Image: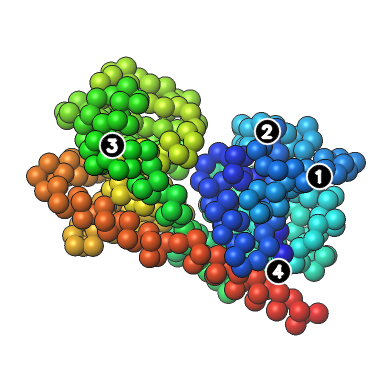
Amino acid sequence: MKVLMTTMEYDVIKVGGLSAALTSIAQTMKRFAEPKVILPRSGRAVPWRKLGSKEYPNVMVDVFNHQGVEVYTLSNVVLDEREVYPEPANDKAIKKINEFGERLIEVVDALDFDVVHMHDFFAYRTMGKFREMGKPVLLTIHRLHREYPNWFYGEKIALEKADFVTVVGKSYYQEDEKELFEKYRDKTTHVFNGIDTNFWSVNASSYARLPRKERRKLVLRRYGLTDGIFYLYVGRFDPVQKGVDVLLKASETFLAEEEVRMIVVGVGDKKLEQWSKTLEEKFPSKFKAINKLLKREEVRDLYSSADFALIPSLFEPFGLVQLEAMSCECVPIGSRTGGIKDTVISYEEDREKATGFLVEKGKPEALLQAMRQALEIYRNSPNVVEQMRKNGRRRCETLFRWEVSCQQYFKLYQKLLENRGHAK
């Protein structure tokens, strides 16, 4: 079975978690089917092995092999805009997304595939063409974008036209977006994202053989900080979703009262970036702001040495950060929402099975209180934190493996093809 996956992000063409998810899904799906990925080139140099090129009237298609996955990149003046989602997103990014859909219509007849797996709505303008070709479409919602009306308009079209819909988080579609997904309840389910526990592992990190405290000391030194109990944030500086303002407000109080270490990693909203730099100037021995994207290996080293991962999202359909942290035996402190709630077992709810702490979303004081609680437990009952580390790693290994997700997707592909066959 040949599966065409449409996306805006894959491997090095990325902004955030969608790239990580897409790359893992495509690579894991090789065990069940033949995945092919198609996306805008976004002006990026890619390290993949080139197989060929084809020029069309309005677009250039380059074909690559990335570790056994065929990747097609589309290039023209609009699609080679280097920002994956150019700002302002509701104007320029939607123009690029619409161009992607139109150019897909131009090239898709030459591609060999049986079923389409749309990751988010980005190929929504091609859905009529897919229907003409008799190719069933599975739409996976990684997140909705109500904050951009032009995006949300496309998302509603995609939901209407898709043959079946999956959502990456159970709570996201059954609670957070219940009213919307209720309209499509007969063709919607959830398929959790997963985590590559071989890559996201302390054993694969730098200084893997050292005790965690020694590893922490070396990694903090790498970023100009001396050793101390270590809190970490990695994610987009997204003012709508990620709660970075909540994090920075809580952290300002926390850093003023406690001798801890904190690193925040991310890019995005310039006001939030400046706020993070202001905190670095105020607490130079405690706080480091890294306003750039780090390589996955660098992020793995951070999770493999940090004590606590901060995840203050205001909403999170699924989120990979908490799994990356738990897989590297770092204890998450996250918002009680969406996929974070689906994956983290809170200390307040089950102390024996706990993998982290959950707090009310959008409340700096709630986050601050959890940061204090985690610090107190670490200092007075380190064995409790150690048990959380083990619980989190075990939970990733048993429940959130990409093989499980891809098996579910593959069964849906089969069902869609069977239904399409009956329809004929």
- Mark before the other along the chain sequence, 4 or 2: 4
- Residue 278's tag is none
Looking at the image, the residue that sits furthest to the top is 281
Choose between 289 and 423: the one closer to the eye: 289
- Crowding at mark 4 (Cα within 10 Å: few <14, some 14-19, many 20+): few
How far apart, in angstroms, are the residues tagged by discs 1 and 3?
44 Å
Mark 2 is on which residue type? Ala
Choose between 66 and 413: the one closer to the eye: 66
- Mark before the other along the chain sequence, 1 or 4: 4
What residue does disc 2 label?
45
Residue at x-position 75% and y-position 59%: 127
Which element is circle 4 on?
loop
Counting from the top left corner in percent of width and height, residue 144 is at: 55, 51
Colour scheme in use? rainbow
- Mark before the other along the chain sequence, 1 or 3: 1
What residue does disc 4 label?
1
In this picture, residue 134 sits left or right of residue 297: right
Q: In the figure, residue 58 lies in which quadrant? A: top right
